Image: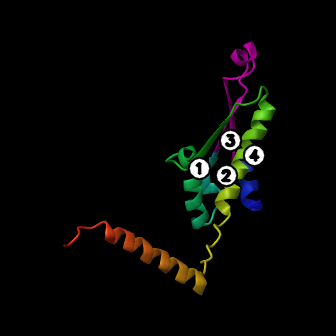
Amino acid sequence: MGRIADTALEIAEEKFIASSGPGGQNVNKVATAVQLRVDVFKLGMPPEAFERLKEVAGSKLTKGGEIVLTANEYRTQEQNREAARERLLALLSEALTPPRKRKKSRVNRVGKVKRLKAKKARGEVKAKRGKIDW
């Protein structure tokens, strides 16, 4: 994670744009929102991590292979920049973490017998609903 995260922050392009939200008249005058763009192909991610990133990023990933994140929750450029970088790192962290293998659960003998008994009882109830043959 460390090398890829460092690379991502180095190659990220930041662009400040006009923001909506809190700030009153300040919003109209100052471009406080941050748009962060990172070219995924320059990160050198393993193929399986790249596939997970495509799922995790969703609509934030463009067809050209760029992740585009916009942060405009705060009134200052610096806070928005930090928020966008944190989101990027969280996204990459989630993509680089392989999913945990599912362990098969094992039902003991008593559990099996109980389940089969319940199935048999349910089958009998359903069988009694059928057409009666006089």
| Magenta run includes residue 110 | no
Residue occupied by mark 1: 57
Earlier residue among tags 2 and 3 = 3
Residue 28: which quarter of the image? top right
Query: Residue at position x 67%, y 62% from top?
Result: 96
Q: Which amino acid, by three-letter code, is at mark 4?
A: Glu
- Furthest-bottom residue in view? 109
Could you say whether the residue bearing mark 1 is in a helix, strand or loop?
Answer: helix
- Give the alpha-carbon distance from disc 3 to disc 4, as whole Å: 15 Å
Label 1 and label 4: CA atoms lie apart by 14 Å
Question: Mark 2 — residue?
Answer: 91
Q: Position of residue 66 (x, y in %)?
A: 58, 47
Q: CA distance from mark 2 to mark 1?
A: 7 Å
Mark 3 or mark 4, which has the lower sequence index?
A: 3
Q: Position of residue 98 (x, y in %)?
A: 65, 67
Dots 2 and 1: beta carbons under 8 Å? yes
Helix, strand or loop for disc 4: helix
Q: Which residue is mark 3?
A: 13
Q: How is the image coloured?
A: rainbow
Task: Identify the secondary structure beneath mark 3.
Answer: strand
The region drawn magenta spans 12-37
Q: Of discs 2 and 3, which sits in the foreground?
A: 2
- Amino acid type at image mark 2: Leu
Q: Quadrant of residue 6?
A: bottom right
Classify 65 as above or below 112: above
